[in-house]
Amino acid sequence: MSPSQFTDKLAGQRVLLVGGTGGVGVSVAQALLEFGATIVLSSSHESKVKDVRAALLQDYPEAKDRISGYPCDLASPDVESNIEQLFNQAGNVDHIVYMAGDRLPMVPLEEVTLENWQKYNQVRTIAAILVIKVGVRHMKKDRHSSIVLTGGSISEKPIAGGWSMLALMGAGLNGLGRQLAYDLAPIRVNIVAPGVIETDLWQRMGEDGKRAFFAEHEGKIPTGKVGQPVDLAEAYLYCLKDTNATGVVVHSNSGTFLV
Ligand SMILES: NC(=O)c1ccc[n+]([C@@H]2O[C@H](COP(=O)([O-])OP(=O)(O)OC[C@H]3O[C@@H](n4cnc5c(N)ncnc54)[C@H](OP(=O)(O)O)[C@@H]3O)[C@@H](O)[C@H]2O)c1
């Protein structure tokens, strides 16, 4: 037995972080670097990829050869060729962590249209399955390889305020993850389902709107605190490290299912 059999589990593993420049992505990137993994960041804005890479290099100078990044716009009509190009640049990987998400589609039922439903699905669901389709060609067929999708607690716990599109996407991602765990075995596929996590995703509510929403939420949830990206990162680490876990949904949600 090695005295670092747990802490070394991710050392030397190559992990592609799709949507790796957002609040959740940066925490997952930091955790992976601390555990000795090599990361490839990707998101649509080249400047964001550059800035996040630079910030990580500053915080983890010893990891300078373990951080790369490439832009890839998943909202584009050229999404499939963009993904092919991303994998040509990224090369082979041990894990793909999919965290890309654009504007929150909080759309009341009466405003749902074919057009906005298709548009809002592209980054969270359509591109997710395309990334996996291309990505498996760049992965070893092994239980040490894995894919992690990002859904949400809304798939199982309804809340007020125009969440039907996200509920359907989240439930769909849970189903997709389980099905692909079956289809792609022995590559493992798991899903992380976050509750409310404090990231820029909520910035579009405006600072006052976000604070009011968080305060109201914190008045109800058992932990009394909106989740932090450093908390949620643990759920992704678990999915990557437990070679016995596949087809599971890992929840990190402040205990929201209890209330
Ligand atoms: N925060 C929460 O409370 C919460 C709760 C449940 C689920 N989630 C899910 O968790 C994931 C990460 O959320 P987050 O809070 O970290 O959000 P975030 O801070 O807004 O980050 C979103 C990430 O997605 C990337 N992205 C957006 N549009 C893209 C596109 N067209 N192509 C490629 N990448 C794109 C962003 O980078 P660019 O702008 O450079 O593209 C960024 O890296 C999302 O799927 C979100 O729906 C979050």
Image (cartoon, helix red, strand yellow):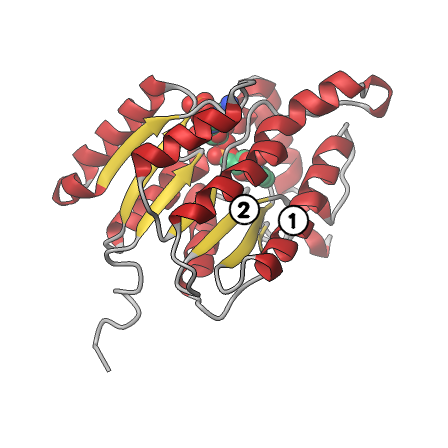
Task: Determine contact: label 2, label 1, CB under 8 Å.
Answer: yes
Quarter location, residue 250: bottom right
In the picture, measured across the screen, residue 154 lies left or right of residue 241, that is right
Residue holding disc 1: 176
The outermost residue toward the left is: 62
Q: What element carries label 1?
A: helix
- Secondary structure of the residue carrying tag 2 is strand
Give coordinates of residue 167: x percent, y percent. Answer: 73, 39
Instruction: Give the number of the disc on residue 149.
Output: 2
Q: Which of marks 2 and 1 is in front?
A: 1
Q: Which residue lies furthest to the bottom in this view?
A: 1
From the viewer's perspective, tell me whether residue 163 is left or right of residue 31. Answer: right
Residue 45: give its label: none
Disc 2/disc 1 C-alpha distance (Å): 9 Å
Estimate the x, y position of residue 18 in percent, counting from the top left. Answer: 43, 36
x and y, in percent, of residue 12 in the image: 24, 56
Amino acid at circle 1? Leu
